[in-house]
Amino acid sequence: MKKVVTLGEIMLRLSPPNYQRIEQAQSFDAVYGGGEANVAVSLAKFGLTSSFVTKLPNNPLGISAKQHLNQFGVLTNDVLFGGDRLGIYFLEKGHSIRSSMVTYDRKNSAFAMSKADEYDFAKIFADADWFHISGITPALNEELFELTRRALVAAKEMGLTTSCDLNFRSALWSFEKAREKMTELIKYVDVCIGIEPLKLLDKNGNEIKDELPEKPSISDYKDVMMQMKQQFGVKYVAMTKREQLSVSSNRLHALLFDGEDIYQSTEVNVDIIDRVGTGDAFSAGIIYSLLNNYPSQNAIEFATGCFALKHTIEGDANLISISDVEKYMNGSFAINR
């Protein structure tokens, strides 16, 4: 059985019920989540050996976060314990014309304060096939950027396939800093999910300021993805696309570039119960389909199914099975073009 390792921060998510604002709330719904942890849960639900690496406080919240992962089959053998607190984020869920809003309370969390040399990657990657990260961890501070770099270098040296969801978060760092730092990391990545923020260069070594026109075509995306392959050596590039019909309703599809050709999934309309974690669900779908050698068109259809179905699941994690995705793919929910 293939083994995937993910590394990042798991946090406590607190949400006012019934689409309330925080100032209205008398109680909060509590779940655990975080980008890489969500990917780990999805892959465990798909039947892969899935391991999540982080640092948690040795208190009831840290232990509860670990138990959350374990209940879905995620391995936590390499989780470290120490530090003072678990990161928290508050989610106000939007509806109709009011957008959702996230407020972070994660400063000085156990993971954010961890050190790169605490993690034994020779042990962590000993029996692994794939390593996944996102752009969230290196955004937290310089030490965690170094942790991410060391992890990617070790994974490549040990022969693992590596993937990265670029996942730019403006609340964590500027676009300019993200572009500088993620461009440095992407040379260690085989499968890149997303195309921004990366610094692309023309044939003369000058930065390309406007990689895409205002309304890009499939050919435009292919040109950028081919440039990413040539400049960084990535083997695959995948990305999601959404058209916002309202805050509560979106039209979705996705693209996959396999180094030669670009593939577009079928479009699907979704009514949104919970948008958080939808990109993580897509990442898990890409990882699972490529690990299982799906043809490129099948791979992007599978990943898009994961992406779309997560919009209908409350909480951070995409609690669906392979059969759920297959039923969607074989159903009549798609818009035929």
Image (spheres, rainbow, N blue to C red):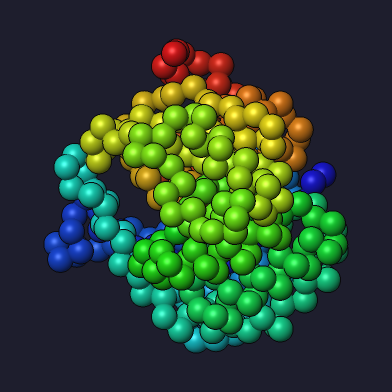
Q: Would residue 196 be found to the left or right of residue 78 on screen?
A: left
Q: Which residue lies furthest to the front in this view?
A: 204
Give percent across and percent down for residue 304: 52, 32
Quadrant placement of the N terminus: top right
What is the quadrant of residue 68 in the picture?
A: bottom right
Does residue 16 appear in the picture of this structure? yes
What is the quadrant of residue 169 in the picture?
A: bottom left
Q: Which residue is drawn at 68% across and 59% down?
A: 187
Does residue 124 appear in the picture of this structure? no
Q: Would residue 118 be found to the left or right of residue 194 on screen?
A: right
Q: Residue at x 71, y 83 (%)?
A: 117
Q: Residue at x 18, y 59 (%)?
A: 21
Residue closest to the eye, 48 or 176: 176
Quadrant placement of the C terminus: top left
Q: Which residue lies furthest to the left in this view?
A: 24
Give percent across and percent down for residue 152: 71, 65
Q: Residue at x 62, y 40 (%)?
A: 226
Give percent across and percent down for residue 102: 31, 61
Q: Is 281 situated above or below 88?
A: above
Total number of numbered labels? 0
Q: Would residue 328 be found to the left or right of residue 172 on screen?
A: right
What is the quadrant of residue 324 in the picture?
A: top right
